[in-house]
Each structure stands twice: as C-alpha cells, then as structure tokens.
Amino acid sequence: MPSDFSITIIGSNSALAAQGRFPTAQYISFKSKHFLIDCGEGTQFRMNDFKVPKAHIEKIFISHLHGDHFYGLIGLLTSYSLSNRIKPIEIYTPKGLREIIELQSMYSDAHFTYEIIYKETQALSNEVLFEDESICISSFPLKHRIPTTGFLFQEKVTERKLIKEKINSFDLSVDEIIQLKNQQNVVRNDGTILSVEEFTHPITKARSYAYCSDTAYFEEIIPIIKNVDLLYHETTFDKNLVALAQKTNHSTTLEAARIASLAEVKQLMIGHFSSRYKHSEMLMDECKTIFDNTIIAIEGETFYID
Amino acid sequence: MPSDFSITIIGSNSALAAQGRFPTAQYISFKSKHFLIDCGEGTQFRMNDFKVPKAHIEKIFISHLHGDHFYGLIGLLTSYSLSNRIKPIEIYTPKGLREIIELQSMYSDAHFTYEIIYKETQALSNEVLFEDESICISSFPLKHRIPTTGFLFQEKVTERKLIKEKINSFDLSVDEIIQLKNQQNVVRNDGTILSVEEFTHPITKARSYAYCSDTAYFEEIIPIIKNVDLLYHETTFDKNLVALAQKTNHSTTLEAARIASLAEVKQLMIGHFSSRYKHSEMLMDECKTIFDNTIIAIEGETFYID
C-alpha cells in the first residue's frame, strides 16, 4: 500500500520548459497535510493534468525568486479566488514575493477570497518554519545567485500507541494505560507482566524528505540533510560541465551524488535538468557511479516514502 | 493558398484554464511582421506546441491587466533572454505592466539580453499605436472593470505596382513610370495610350482585423470596427446570463452578434468562453441567430484573412 508521505513531481526542468519537461514544482502529501514546493509557470494546469488535489494545499514553500520557481504562483492564487477558496494559505518565501503579488493584484483590481499569510524566509541559517505533533518543516541556506533555501520535511517520532483490543481483554486501568504509553512495563499485583512490546504498536521510524534546488555544490548542507530517506538535489548539468555549474551556481550530477553519499541519505532523486538534455537517464547513470540509489524526478509520478 | 494575414489562437478561455482551453493569447502574422495579442499563463508553452515562431514576435499588445491576459508575459520575456534574444521588443500595455515586470526582474536579479520598449496605452480614446507603409495598428477603449483597450489591425491601401515585364517591353521612361504609379494614363507622342489598368497590378483591397476582449456590450466601438473583415469579440456568457455579463462587464453571445451585425463586419469570431461551457458550439449557434457568419476561436487553429 502506498505510504501517507509522498512527493508528486509537477515540473523537473530548469529555466525554460523544454524536452517535454516543465519548470519546478512539487506537491507533498503528508498524512492529511498538503504542501507545494515552488510553483513554476503552468503549475496549476499541470496539477489539473496530474489530478493533484490542489484545493487541499495549505502551505506553499518558495525556494527563491527565479522565475522558473515562482512565475506560476500568481495564477494559482488567482484561480483559488475564482473557485471561491475560503481556507487561508501560508506562503513561505524570500522577501519580495509579497510585493510582487500585491502589485499585480492592485493593477488587476483583484481581491483574494481568502487570506494569504506570507512568512518570510531568510537564507542565513537553518530555521524551523512550521511544527506540529506530526511534522517539522524547516528551511536551510543553499548556495545560489540570489537568496535561496532548501526545505526539510521531518516526521516526528510519535509516542507508542496502545493496541486497542488489549484494553478490554485485559481490563486495563487508566494508570496502566498511561504507564504503557510512557513505555514502562506494568507489573500487576498477581505478578503478571504487561509488556510495552506486547500491548503497544511499534514506534514508526520518523521519515524525512529534503529538497535542495537551486544550489551549487555546498557541503554545509550535509549535517542538515544527514540520513534523510529521500534527498531531492538538483543536477542541472552533466559531470563535464563543472565550470558552467560553478559559474551559474548550479550542481553537476557527480556533485549531487557526492552530497548524497557524504550525507548518507537513503535515496537521491535528481531534477532541474538543463534544457540541453533530451533524456535524463544519462544524468542518473553518472550519479550512480558515486551513489547507486539514484532515481529521476519524473513529471507526473508520485514517489512514496515508506 | 493561405493569405499573408493570419490569426493563430493560442488561448480562448476566460479566467481559469478549463475544458481543455487556456487563457487568452493570439498570434498575428501580417506579411513579414509578427505580433502577439495578450499573453495568459502558459502562452509560451502553447506557442511551442503549436509551432508558432515566437522568436519572430516584435510587438506585443496587452489589452488589460487581468491575469488571464498577461500572467504569461514575464515567462515569455524571461525565455527570450535565456535564448539570447537581441532584437528589441515593443510592448503596448496599460500603465502598470512595466512596474510589474521590473519588480520581478529586480528580485530575480535578472537582466534582459534585449531592450524592452514599453508604450503605454490609454483607454480614453482611439489612438494609433503603430503605422508604417503597410499597416496601421490602433487601440480603442472597451468597457470593462479596469482600463481595457481593443486593437484594430488595418492593412494600408498600397499604391499600384508596375507590372515589371512591361517596363522593358515598352521601354518605359522614369517619368512614365511615375505617372502610371500615380494612377494616370500615359499618352505618348505617337498617340499610344499606356493605361494604368494594363500596366499596373490591381490595388489589393485593404484587410482588417479587430480584437475586442474583454468588454461589456459597448456600441461606441461600432464606428471603429465598421466593416472589418474579421471581428474577434468576446462571448464569455450564453444569451441567458445577461445579468451576470452586465455585473462582470463581459458580453453574451447575442450582444457580440448584435455588435457584429451593427458594425456590418464580414465575419465574427467568438472566444473568451466561461469555464462553465464544455463545448462552445452552442454559443456559436446562439450568435448565428443574429449574425450568421460566426466562427469559434479554436485553440491551435490559424485563421486567414483573404
């Protein structure tokens, strides 16, 4: 069964739409929460094509203000109004986006039917953006030409949950339940031992996803993304275009793979491909020479984190 | 043979993309000139799909600053830079667009590789925007919620051109050539008459195209668009939604057809359909009850003006 933590790729190209690929956007579904990372031009149309439930999105994370990561946002926000959205939306974004959206709204004489809550990110240090009982979402600086952050989605380790059937069959008292939830075995007066393992579900290992685009090779992110289940890292260029990658503050395949390897992540997903590449398999193969568990961010596909 | 004056429909829906239709944009090709009218989100992608030679576009006309008519412009302009465009581009637009584009460029730290020449339209009276020896392009006020103009493309009646073969076979002098071009018959000393009809090509009738979107029913445009070969007039709503059309400053089918009829245009093309309509044939049929020569602006199709 697919897990309740997934990433759907809306766009995986860099800069221009080309080779059938589109600018960056990813839809994240985590339990009952729905997020969007970046929003290149046409994201709303492609979410329609891919049957992504875009009305459910409650938080949008914009990595930086290059057009291929945000030109589709004003259209999506406008469409929400046209469909009479009421639920507020939070946008985590570098400084500038609010001014851009509000200027366009002013000239259009448009009024949003819902509240937009802008939360400015800063690309200076790690920062927790949102946290509740099940997830922690934080940003961290990347190395690019303008202020840019990556995003880290970390599931929280939940407390052990009682196996419900045991409550009745063993006639558990409230005190016993609390003790078990706190991971202490119960010793009854008659000597019976009610063990934590027997009476509670195992703790689910916390899952994690890190998004790193756009960025040059930047080892400072390694401690932050250490051991994540899935790392999305841009590979704009193939291994031979190191100089161009350095000049434009992007990464090559081998650089991304090296980061994945040093951070000991479980899996690497590559994207943000230069329009010069008709196929991205060659880029994946280059990564695999350093980090074997590499996959391609294929548009329209959903990747589950188990 | 297709004529050298054509309109390619890039998008024909209103507001949202829906029913497989996209927001407004039209590509106009006139002899060796190439224009774009409006530029909804995704216009650049759809021009790729339809193999429209977008690099050739030299002038862009924006009717008004509602998102479905201009959200795709910043992406197109950015893509031109990414493909190292050098040729300047002129943008005829209401006040505001320059500020919007420049604000986004500032935060993206983007620099265009070519010059953008903004020419502000005003929606107060008719105005010639561009004129040369072959075409006159003008704007005129429409009736909408924010300042909005229609656009009129008028071919100029050209002077009669000499039939080249006659020059040699009759050994025409420079004076005789000038006289014939000025539409005067030549009478030679020996009494021979060189008639304008025999020595020059017939004058091509001037062709014309008028674009009216978005607008409420607005009879003041009639003298401006009188007798045009092709009138594009929005029909956002069917004949029963008169109240909604009035409220939103859009037109119904019957209103557009009435304008076409009163202006005695040759042909009416309808578009800017509300997302509620799965098919637009019904809207065309309604128009035909008043104005028979009505066609639908089908996306991806090119319409020639003969």
Image: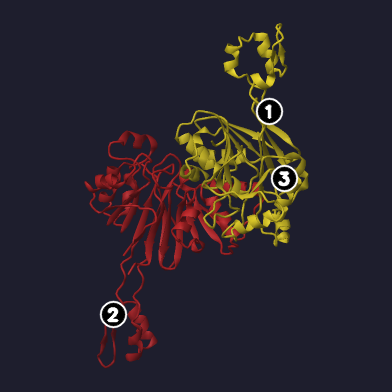
Chain colours: A yellow, B red
Q: Earlier in the sequence, mark 1 or mark 3?
A: 3
User: Which is nearer the eye, A238 or B117?
Assistant: A238
How would you rate the neighbour count of disc 1 (Cα within 10 Å): few for under 14, some for 14-19, many for 20 or more? Answer: some
* Mark seen at residue A142: 3
Q: Chain of mark 1?
A: A
Give how far apart the Cα atoms at labels 1 and 2 are: 93 Å
Q: Is residue A86 left or right of residue B167?
A: right
Give the residue furthest to the front. A191
Give the residue furthest to the bottom. B190
- Residue mark closest to the camera, 1 vs 2: 1
Identify the image quadrant of the C terminus of chain B.
bottom left
Q: Chain of mark 2?
A: B
Q: Chain of mark 3?
A: A
Q: Which residue is mark 2?
A: B196
Q: Position of residue A144 (x, y in %)?
A: 71, 49
Q: Are marks 1 and 3 on the same chain?
A: yes
Q: Disc 2 residue type? A: Val
Q: Are marks 2 and 3 on the same chain?
A: no
User: Which is nearer the eye, B52 or A208?
Assistant: A208
Q: Disc 1 residue type? A: Val
Query: Residue, x 70% and y 48% (percent of image)?
Result: A146
Q: Disc 3 residue type? A: Leu
Identify the image quadrant of the N terminus of chain B.
bottom left
Q: Is residue A165 left or right of residue A128?
A: left
